Amino acid sequence: QVEWSALYAREVVEPAGLREAFDGLAPDAADRCLAQAREAYALGRVATAEEAVAATWRWRDGDFPRLVHLVGPSGSGKSTFARGLPCVGTYLSLDGLRLARGSRADQRANGDVLREGLDRLDAALAAGGTVVWDATSLNAHQRSLVHAVARRRDALLTHAVALVDGAELVRRNGRRDHPVPPGVLDAQLRRFVPPYPGQAHRTWYIGASGTVEDRA
């Protein structure tokens, strides 16, 4: 997967001057316009930087909600990273919703918890501001449910992907207030399929340091 991603990155092309076309915009607006322009170019809808500017005009003022979608196994530092983000209006944690029902470890009502979380996400994005979705979101299917809400509310979607090696995850899990059983963590690692760049407007890669160490 890493080799395929690297090959994909080397093949990415875009019109000359595209990035510079959005200089002067606020950072979130510039990222959104650049992402939308690249998608339009890939689909053959624009061919020049000037056409890209025209096609992305409605996002230039930054008047759209923001969604930071955390991705990664338990103990990879997602929640710690999210708590340090500025200007977060709504923080939605599936573990928190389970806890409100009685136990964060109780998986029996996962369907109801997910539906409640998605309803809250929809309402929060409709109100505007920045929303954080805190769940493992290990595969494309799990992420797609959140993406559908983000698209409906025209939100800037950021994947915050926590990448920590297995040995470090095991060490951290043993020190957590709410550790997961070793078998559960192993199963998460087997199922973990990180998103590719382009599956969100932008991607942040969070390393073991707990900070954004790379961006796409």
Image: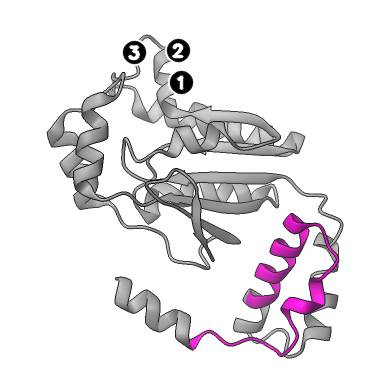
- Which residue: 61% across, 61% down? 201
Q: Amino acid at mark 1?
A: Leu
- Which residue: 42% across, 25% down? 112
In this figure, which residue is indicated by the disc labeled 3? Answer: 103
Q: Amino acid at mark 2?
A: Ala
**Left or right of 153: which side holds 71?**
left
- Which residue: 46% across, 80% down? 9
Q: Main secondary structure of the magenta part?
A: helix
**SS class of the residue under badge 2?**
helix
User: Observer-nearest residue: 191 or 168?
Assistant: 168
Do callouts 1 and 2 mark residues in contact (Cβ within 8 Å)?
A: yes
Q: Say if 175 sits above or below 140 in the image.
A: above
Read off the magenta span: 11-38
State the image coordinates of residue 103 (x, y, percent, origin top left): 34, 13
25 is within the stretch colored magenta: yes
Rounded to the nearest angstrom, the CA distance separating label 3 from label 2 is: 7 Å
Q: Say if 177 sits above or below 126 in the image.
A: above
Dot 1 or dot 3: first in sequence order is 1
Quadrant in the picture for the C terminus: bottom right
Checking the image for residue 115, the label placed there is: none
State the image coordinates of residue 54 (x, y, percent, origin top left): 85, 77
In this figure, which residue is indicated by the disc labeled 1? Answer: 97
Checking the image for residue 100, the label placed there is: 2
